[in-house]
Amino acid sequence: MEFFKNGVTAHRGNSAQLPENTMLAFISAVSIEADWIEADIRQTAEGKLIVLHDDDTKRLANRNLSIKNVTYAELEAVDIAYQFRFTNQLTIEQCPKLPVPLLSDVINLMKSQKLTKSQHFTRLSIHPKVDCIDKVIQLIEDMNAMIWVGFNDSNLRNLKQVKAWNPEISAFWDRPADSDIDDDIEMAREFGVESIIIQHDGITSPKVKSVHSAGLEVGAWTVNDLSTMENLLELGVDRIYTDCPIDLLVIKSQSSPLGENLLNPSQQL
């Protein structure tokens, strides 16, 4: 089985085009052939693993619920596409109501992919936002999904635990712009992390060269400006996290636009 290796991580799915961290955004990211999709993970009151960045639904939904204090049944009733629809002045037909997905739903999407023309697949990068690594690992094992997932995190202890469980799992270490790159390289080597993902304002040519000289991949988060994407690619950045994966794919391919491959919300239902 082969996976895409184009250096495009769809941040929270194709989140510029569709509501972030929803099944539609993830389906779209698969359809345009990003090599990784990043998804943020939290737990409900009864311990269900769900996909949402914030600790409540205030920013995105039509109701404000605290994730750790509600059951999944309560959370599922919330329209997580509400603010996206309002901001983009879309109708309910153009942007249907959407629930918060379960992590298991997104993993099933990865596993259900059909062969592309190039016979490659997209994978899921899991970003735990709370202390739930043990449960995530157990779910991955239960679903026999090891080859379909990786992890990205700023917490090196979490990545260490992931690597202790399975050294073959891809691990992306998120770093701030002002981190000491030499220290980061030393720690990444110690814990078996193969990718250092730096906040894009802090990326310089010497940093990129240092990471590459250590045999590691260097990435940037989170980049939506086209000129910034181009500059980072010129510096030799291997991976870019973006809400606009289609734009990045077009820049990288320098060929015909890929926008025609994007399904609209009504087509994806």
Image (tube, rainbow, N blue to C red):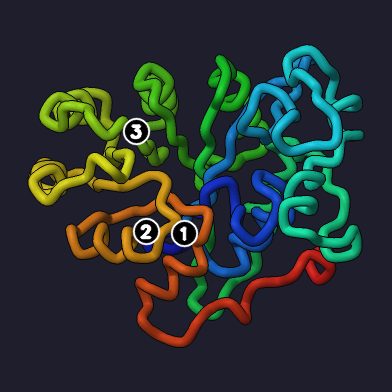
Report whether residue 148 is seen.
Answer: no
Whichever of labels 2 and 1 marks the residue nearer the N terminus, that label is 2
Q: Amino acid at mark 3?
A: Trp
In the picture shown, does residue 127 fall above or below 183? below
- Left or right, 210 with respect to 24, comes to left
Give the residue number, with chain letter if any, for mark 1. Answer: 35
Q: CA distance from mark 2 to mark 3?
A: 15 Å
Whichever of labels 2 and 3 marks the residue nearer the N terminus, that label is 2
Q: Position of residue 190 (x, y in %)?
A: 20, 23
At 73% from the left edge and 15% from the top edge, which residue is drawn? 68
Secondary structure under badge 3?
Answer: strand
Indicate which disc residue 150 carries. Answer: none
Q: Is the residue under label 1 in contact with that under label 2 (CB below 8 Å)?
A: yes
Please count the marks in the image: 3
Give the residue number, with chain letter if any, for mark 2. Answer: 7
Indicate which disc residue 173 carries. Answer: 3
| Crowd tier of the residue under label 2, counting other residues whose Cα lies within 10 Å: few below 14, some 14–19, many 20 or above | some
At 53% from the left edge and 78% from the top edge, which residue is drawn? 258
Q: Amino acid at mark 1?
A: Asp
Q: Position of residue 13 (x, y in %)?
A: 60, 52
At 20% from the left edge and 44% from the top edge, which residue is drawn? 216
